[in-house]
Amino acid sequence: MTEPLYQSIAEDLEAQIRSGQLPPGSQLRTEQALQDKYEASRNTVRDAVKRLIARGLVETRPGQGTFVLEEIVPYVTTLSTDPVKGSSEGAVYQGETEVEPTKSRPRVEIQQADPDVALALGLGQGGEVVSRHQERYVGETPWSLQTSFYPLALVTEGAQRLIQPKDIQQGTVDYLKETLGLAQAGYRDTITVRAPKASESSFFGVPADGRVAILEAFRTAFDQHGKPLRVTITVYPADRTRFEINAGEVPPGAPGVATGQAGKISDTGQGTGRAPARGG
Amino acid sequence: MTEPLYQSIAEDLEAQIRSGQLPPGSQLRTEQALQDKYEASRNTVRDAVKRLIARGLVETRPGQGTFVLEEIVPYVTTLSTDPVKGSSEGAVYQGETEVEPTKSRPRVEIQQADPDVALALGLGQGGEVVSRHQERYVGETPWSLQTSFYPLALVTEGAQRLIQPKDIQQGTVDYLKETLGLAQAGYRDTITVRAPKASESSFFGVPADGRVAILEAFRTAFDQHGKPLRVTITVYPADRTRFEINAGEVPPGAPGVATGQAGKISDTGQGTGRAPARGG
DNA sequence: AACGATTTGTTCGTATGTATC
DNA sequence: TGATACATACGAACAAATCGT
């Protein structure tokens, strides 16, 4: 018996969930009942349940019990779309998602750029930037937090609307093209996974202890002269997000990955696992 | 005191780490000493340390103590590069990384495609595929696991080398072009984050309980007729991986994101956080 | 090689607080 | 209001790993 008891309990419960014996939405036995079944103490049972929580399989609701989570069907976010064939425009636009998100009114601030942003924008340390921050929802559920940073110089050069706290119609890409003649000729996305910050976990409604990861997309956009035009940082909760990137010619309706690939995961080969789930 | 004790202890310790007061590699006080300092019981102190572990800030070594982890500098993986200007080729190639990885000899199998793969390749359920699996290292450290799936039909049509267990020089993209005239005209990547499977956590040497997430890139490649040619699934440990995607014209040497952006993270605005770290 | 001291890992028991029904 | 169920916190015991003597 080299395996800790709490671990084998967790594995037994996980097997029941994966096999469908405990379907999504169903309630686990109470801690008391689990103690009886496995002949373990309350703390040991709780340790086992903690593992299931960490794996995104169940959630505990005080006063009610422990429940198997629904599998989340992630929103697909298209990060990069090649220009449509025959587009003569030199500019590259960012497509993001088929489902139109609801955006909050932008919160606009003028700040000293933090080191990452300053570096990406080619500013000196402490260079000033306009920051435009938006919360974005799909329906009722929080979907992403986005902050764009523009060099303050763009405003003084004539793009005054950047510092107005209202949504700029047609997006800032077109606006900068019209006012300053700066096209977005390309961009670079850097994608990382990290633990949520306090503000992020409260907005997304995910636990603060890193059980649900955050996907961060750090986009540096360049103008036609290769000069950094903007930095946009967008963060998503990893459990309900799926990035999609197309390159070259891709059939439009081509299936990417299965939307519902639940259960029955063998670990012999390599395939898509069950997406970490989370429910509310 | 609305905040739990174990949480405030964790925050205090985390602040010390982020501020550099507890530098990477240094040892935390023993549980006994922490009990004295915070006037809490051993279990409460241990709960606090567990939070730090979940955040990837420290690791515990039985018999020795608790240590602050080194910050990991992630390998950058370029997922998608637009064709270089003036490239007349219609085919799109996949660039991956500047550091050349070491690949294991491929393990080749003929399998029934699992549902995801079958769907992406446009095969019926249980359609047969050639699977080519490789482990990839950067230096000594495990970097990624990759499995490519090809419809078995390609082999019967003349691409016999697909089922030979040796590395195909110049890659399978060129090989299929030469033998069957099938060019890779484009591809679609789908990126998801999930908990590691048992085989993955043992290969990467990460804990099995989901503290370190797995980045999965599911690539469906299409030929010039828009027909799925191949599915490639690559998985990376999220804590040492950074994806980079370029679109349009991007200056080659342009800084993406800071390579060392440690410490001193305020949560007032939105910026890049410390990457989840892990050490050995 | 053996032993003891130190440190973390696991498990138990118990008490109290808080949310839900 | 009371019962139920999870959250937090404390104390205690033994096991296992590590290190120095």
Image: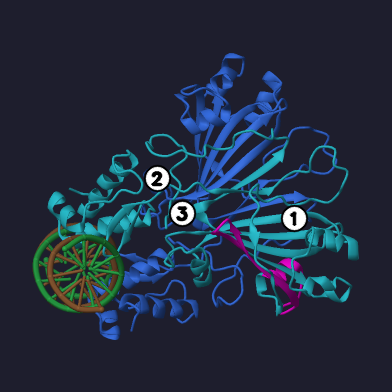
Chain colours: A blue, B cyan, C brown, D green
Q: Is residue B267 left or right of residue C2?
A: right
Asked whether the residues under marks 2 and 3 belong to the same chain, the reply is yes
At which x and y percent is residue B49? 28, 56
Q: Are marks 1 and 2 in contact (CB under 8 Å)?
A: no
Residue under circle 3?
A: A213
Characterize the local packing of mark 3: few (<14), some (14-19) or many (20 or more) Cα atoms within 10 angstroms: many
Give the position of the C terminus of chain B as an image quadrant.
bottom left
In x, y percent, where is residue A235? 51, 45
User: Taking the image as drawn, is residue A142 in sight?
Assistant: no
Q: Are marks 3 and 1 in contact (CB under 8 Å)?
A: no
User: Of the residues shown, which amino acid type is indicated by label 2?
Assistant: Lys
Identify which amino acid the numbered label 1 is placed on: Tyr
Q: Is residue B187 left or right of residue B210?
A: right
- For the residue labelled by badge 2, is the local secondary structure a helix, a strand or a loop? loop
**Residue interval drawn in magenta:** B117-145
**Disc 3 from disc 1: Cα separation:** 27 Å
**Residue with the mark numbered 1:** B187
